[in-house]
Image: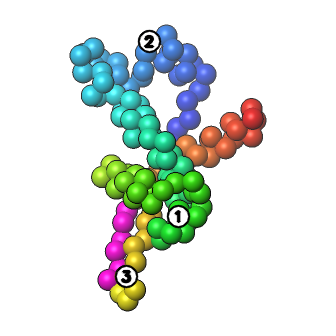
């Protein structure tokens, strides 16, 4: 993954989103990958769940709920389903006794690691 340099960022500010150049204005909302990603991240718990999943290879539902804290079972289950539908989270069901489910990041979800790393660098510098 290539980091944006100052010139790239200036171009984005002056010309609009670099990924949307050449796209008809009527198609901007459906074609822009940045807007699509922001929609995926727009839920209250989405980023937090993804971040917790970056710390482990796999995790059970209950352990993930403990790490997050103030989330209800329903909200966690719904958010995990949404992230699974987006292809970011993998769900593995084990039909053992007792049965259990484990969650992990998909390959595309793991490619978000550098984003969290950059967020950590920014946070340690400015917060």
- Please name which of the two marks, 3 or 2, marks the residue nearer to the observer: 3
**Viewer-side residue, 69 vs 111:** 69
Q: Which mark is residue 15?
A: 2
Residue at the spot 75% in from the left edge and 40% down from the top edge: 124
Q: CA distance from mark 2 to mark 1?
A: 41 Å
Q: Are marks 3 and 2 in contact (CB under 8 Å)?
A: no
Residue at the spot 44% in from the left edge and 12% down from the top edge: 15
Q: Earlier in the sequence, mark 3 or mark 2?
A: 2
Structure colour scheme = rainbow
For disc 2, the neighbor class at 10 Å (few under 14, some 14 to 19, many from 20) is few
Q: From this view, report whether residue 25 is shown above or below residue 41.
A: above
Left-right relation of 114 to 85: right
**Viewer-side residue, 16 vs 86:** 86
Q: CA distance from mark 1 to mark 3?
A: 17 Å
- Circle 3 residue: 99
Residue at the spot 41% in from the left edge and 31% down from the top edge: 34
Residue at the spot 49% in from the left edge and 10% down from the top edge: 14
Q: Position of residue 8 (x, y in %)?
A: 53, 22
User: Looking at this rendering, what residue extends furthest in the bottom direction?
Assistant: 97
- Circle 1 residue: 64
Q: Position of residue 123 (x, y in %)?
A: 70, 38
Q: Earlier in the sequence, mark 1 or mark 3?
A: 1
- Please name which of the two marks, 2 or 1, marks the residue nearer to the observer: 1
Q: How many marks?
A: 3
Q: Earlier in the sequence, mark 2 or mark 1?
A: 2
Element type where label 2 sits in the image = helix
Element type where label 3 sits in the image = loop
**Region in magenta:** 89-95
Q: From this view, report whether residue 78 is shown above or below residue 26.
A: below
**Viewer-side residue, 76 vs 14:** 76
Q: Position of residue 22 (x, y in %)?
A: 29, 17
């Amino acid at each position: 993954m290539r980091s944006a340099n100052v010139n790239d960022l200036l171009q984005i500010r002056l010309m609009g989103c670099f990924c949307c150049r050449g796209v008809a204005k009527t198609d901007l909302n459906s074609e822009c990958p940045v807007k699509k990603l922001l929609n995926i991240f727009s839920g209250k718990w989405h980023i937090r769940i993804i971040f917790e999943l970056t710390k482990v290879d796999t995790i059970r539902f209950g352990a993930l709920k403990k790490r997050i804290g103030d989330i209800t079972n329903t909200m966690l289950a719904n958010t995990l389903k949404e992230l699974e539908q987006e292809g970011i989270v993998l769900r593995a069901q084990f039909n053992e006794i007792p049965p259990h489910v484990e969650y992990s990041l998909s390959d595309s979800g793991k490619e978000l690691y550098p984003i969290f790393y950059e967020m950590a660098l920014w946070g340690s510098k400015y917060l």
